Image (cartoon, rainbow, N blue to C red):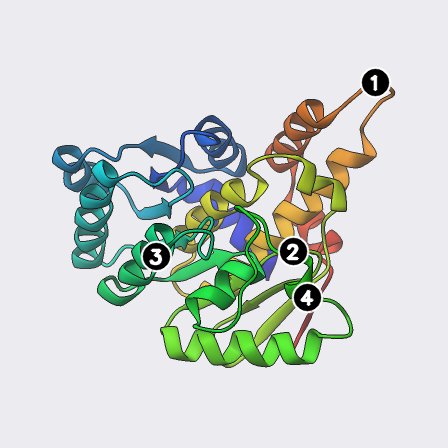
Amino acid sequence: MFKNCLENVRGRIPLIHNITNYVTVNDVANVILACGGSPIMSDEAEDVEDITSLCGGLNINIGTLHKTSIEGIFRAGRRANELGHPIVLDPVGAGASEFRTDTALSLMKDLRLSAVRGNISEIRTLAGDRGNTKGVDADIADAVTEDTLDEAVAFVKAFSRKAGCIIAVTGAVDLVSDGISCFVIRNGRPEMGKITGTGCQLSGIMTAYLTANPDSPLEAAAASVCMMGLAGEIGWSRMQKGDGNATYRNRIIDAVYNMTGEELEKGAKYELR
């Protein structure tokens, strides 16, 4: 299942339009290349409709949101909807400020999204539930654990049905749901939290996977989450004495680049609920 998703990305080389934050833009571009896609970046309102028209999918990340980019985000999103392209929203820091929260909620209301990917605090904020966002990170009080897993799965399924799109919550335990089924994924390393932008990279990969696998969106989204987590495991296993988080970031991207469909199928740790 996941093997086919990976091979479709490598075979179809989807061109992905990214309106993303300037902290991680280079890593997002490189990881999309590593997974088999092709990235292009533009947030200028006069440019985005043409760029979106050339692409197959749109990745929206509000990590360094500013007023001048909002018009571009909406124009790109509306054009992607007209063309039937998948859109992934990464609501970075929703709950940390009214500006970010209101913008993310407006995007969910006005655009037809394929998936929303964020940490549990961001997703709870968008659902109108409690959310304890700490800057752009989830608060430990919101964390999905084995003890809270049943409640979290029910929440994610319900919000997916309400939002009308796939909801992907990533953290120590990842949840990916289309409102009917939910993948519970346990790939990854805690050390990934020491790198800025692993979530941003995942949103880029997810957009590529959804674009290349239009007939199996839930499986494609889950495959992308497993790939990123597995790359974190492989990258960590290759760390040497003296390596730090900068090296780890590169090892993760290298692991994505070198991953085969068989490796992903074998290494994916998930259950379906």
Q: Residue at the far top: name it.
A: 242
Residue 31 locus on image (x, y percent):
52, 34
Q: Earlier in the sequence, mark 4 or mark 1?
A: 4
Looking at the image, do the residues carrying marks 1 and 2 touch, with CB atoms under 8 Å apart? no
Q: CA distance from mark 4 to mark 3?
A: 22 Å
Instruction: Identify the mark at residue 242; answer none if there is no mark.
Output: 1
Q: Residue at x 16, y 42 (%)?
A: 49
For the C terminus, give its image quadrant. bottom right
Q: Earlier in the sequence, mark 3 or mark 1?
A: 3
Q: Residue at x 65, y 39 (%)?
A: 259
Looking at the image, do the residues carrying marks 3 and 1 touch, with CB atoms under 8 Å apart? no
Left of 147 or right of it: where is 9?
A: left
Three-letter code, disc 2: Gly
Residue assigned mark 2: 171
Q: Earlier in the sequence, mark 4 or mark 3?
A: 3
Looking at the image, do the residues carrying marks 2 and 4 touch, with CB atoms under 8 Å apart? yes
Q: Residues within 10 Å of mark 4 (few under 14, many from 20)?
A: many
Q: Residues within 10 Å of mark 3 (few under 14, many from 20)?
A: many
Residue assigned mark 4: 144
Looking at the image, do the residues carrying marks 3 and 2 touch, with CB atoms under 8 Å apart? no
Q: CA distance from mark 3 to mark 1?
A: 40 Å
Residue 40 locus on image (x, y percent):
33, 32
Q: Residue at x 20, y 42 (%)?
A: 72
Q: CA distance from mark 3 to mark 2?
A: 20 Å
Q: Residue at x 40, y 65 (%)?
A: 215
Describe the element under mark 1 as helix, strand or loop: loop
Three-letter code, disc 4: Val
Residue assigned mark 3: 104
For the N terminus, give its image quadrant. bottom right
Q: Earlier in the sequence, mark 3 or mark 2?
A: 3
